[in-house]
Image: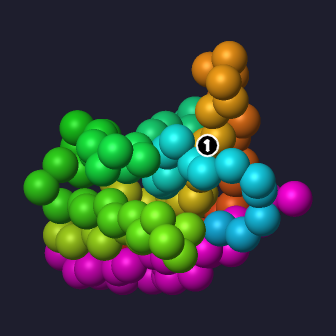
């Protein structure tokens, strides 16, 4: 059973920084991708940042240059450093870990979510 435990988040003023951390345990196979999504009230969940097993990274356009996603394959952890936060970054942030089997089918696992609130 794959479990994701998140930490970090909270309330910060605009321009401030926060760091999210996620530890992944369980599962038989390695994770093809690990990263973060967010969901603001009344909006769909969106990808914030993801790092693949080969180290390549993808970011939500609005977070480029401000957010940095990091992954430790040996420890199965993923973190998100968020700098220069803006009120529009306010959302519940979810850690995600994806496994891909030999048929290229994806299995997504999710953390419980952590609230990030940026005040203006």
Element carrying mark 1: strand
Residue 3 location, quadrant: bottom right
The percent position of residue 29, horizontal first and vertical second, equals 69, 49
The percent position of residue 19, horizontal first and vertical second, equals 38, 79
6 left or right of 2?
left
Q: Is residue 4 above or below residue 43?
A: below
Q: Using the image as rendered, state which of residue 75 and residue 58 is in the foreground.
A: 75
Colour pattern:
rainbow
The percent position of residue 105, horizontal first and vertical second, equals 68, 22
The percent position of residue 34, horizontal first and vertical second, equals 50, 52
Can residue 39 be seen from the camera position used here?
no
Q: Using the image as rendered, state which of residue 89 and residue 65 is in the foreground.
A: 65
* Magenta stretch holds residue 17: yes
Q: Using the image as rendered, state which of residue 26 and residue 44 is in the foreground.
A: 26
Can residue 16 be seen from the camera position used here?
yes
Q: Identify which residue is drawn at 58% across, 49% down.
A: 31
17 left or right of 1?
left
> Furthest-right residue in view?
1
10 Å crowding of disc 1: few (<14), some (14-19), many (20+)? some
Which residue matches tag 1?
A: 98
Instruction: Point out the stretch of residues depicted in magenta.
Output: 1-23
Q: What type of secondary structure mainly makes up the magenta span?
A: strand
Q: Identify which residue is drawn at 45% across, 40% down.
A: 47
Which quadrant does the N terminus fall into?
bottom right
77 left or right of 114?
left
* Magenta stretch holds residue 55: no
């Amino acid at each position: 059973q794959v479990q994701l435990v998140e930490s970090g988040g909270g309330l910060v003023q605009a321009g401030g920084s926060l760091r999210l951390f996620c530890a992944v345990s369980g599962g038989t196979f390695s994770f093809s991708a690990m990263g973060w999504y967010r969901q603001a009230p009344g909006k769909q969940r969106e990808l914030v940042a993801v790092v693949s097993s080969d180290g390549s990274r993808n970011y939500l356009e609005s977070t480029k240059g401000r957010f940095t996603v990091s992954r430790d394959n040996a420890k199965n952890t993923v973190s998100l450093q968020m700098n220069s936060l803006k009120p529009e970054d306010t959302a519940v942030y979810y850690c995600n870990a994806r496994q891909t089997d030999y048929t290229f089918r994806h299995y997504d696992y999710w953390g419980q979510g952590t609230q990030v609130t940026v005040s203006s």
